[in-house]
Image: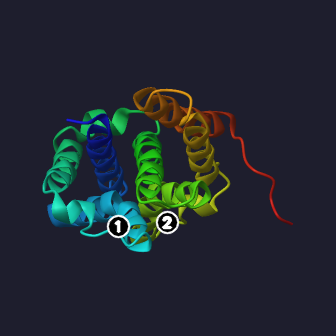
Amino acid sequence: MEIQYIFELLGTYFFAISGALALKDKEPDWFAAMFTGFLTAIGGGTLRDVLLDSYPLVWISDIAFLYAILLGVITTFFFHRTVYKLKKTLMLFDTLGISFFTILGVEKAISLGFRPEIAAIMGMFSGVMGGVIRDTLTNEIPVIFRKEIYATACLAGAGCYLILDSFILRQWNLVISISLIVFIRLLAVSKGLTLPRLK
């Protein structure tokens, strides 16, 4: 089993938890949690594949992704006390999700023959659009429109991957680039770092 496939399943799992957790104050039933977790997990990747004209969509061609989503929702329901106690849990799982999907989105665009600039944008779309869909469904301002550094962290990780691609082994590049996104995102949240605002 390739490391990319493992990371993609992990990203799907983390995003499903993120989507289910977003409903924690709304007393959701199983279907609502599953629906939100599903759209959060597959939203970014589906948009990427449609824009890249890549078919069949990953979650349609491989049932394992649906099982990863189901496992994420089950984890949230049966271990919710533990999950809810984690500091800023939603942000943590969302960060892990965007990190995995950004780099995997870059890789997919490159493998299909697109230019690095397009690959970076597709990586960002893969990472952030699931969260945008989740926030829209739960009547929240999408995190991409808040003060927090979000999409910028994805672009930084995508750029890192593209730069290192010719110099180090792919497995190390995956780990380094994903870790960079996690680091930037957590640092920005913990220190309250933001980009300059338009006035």
**Residue 27 in view, yes or no:** no
Quarter holding residue 41: bottom left
Residue in the foreground of this view, choosing between 120 and 183: 120
Q: Amino acid at mark 2?
A: Glu
Question: Relative to residue 136, is residue 195 drawn left or right?
Answer: right
Quarter location, residue 121: bottom right
Q: Earlier in the sequence, mark 2 or mark 1?
A: 1
Q: Residue at x 50, y 55 (%)?
A: 123
Mark 2 — residue? 140
Residue plotted at (35% across, 67% down)? 46
Above or below, comparing residue 188 to residue 17 in the picture: above
Label 1's element?
Answer: helix
- At 71% from the left edge and 41% from the top edge, which residue is drawn? 193
What crowding class fits label 2: few (fewer than 14 Cα within 10 Å), some (14-19), or many (20 or more)? Answer: few
Helix, strand or loop at mark 2: loop
Instruction: Name the image quarter holding residue 28.
Output: bottom left
Task: Indicate the amino acid at tag 1.
Answer: Thr
The percent coordinates of residue 156 (x first, y second) are: 63, 44
Q: Is residue 125 visible?
A: yes
**In the image, 39: left or right of 198?**
left
Q: Nearer the viewer, residue 152 or 74?
A: 152
Please determine whether, in this image, residue 97 is positioned above or below residue 52.
above
Q: Residue furthest right?
A: 199
Which label number is shown at residue 154?
A: none
Q: Which residue is mark 1?
A: 46
Query: Residue 180, position in %: x, y?
Result: 56, 33
Question: Whole-Å distance between the Cαs marked 2 and 1?
Answer: 22 Å
At a point 48% along the width and 51% down the height, the residue shown is 106
* Left or right of 178 on screen, residue 189: right
Q: How is the image coloured?
A: rainbow
Which of the image's four quarters has the C terminus? Answer: bottom right
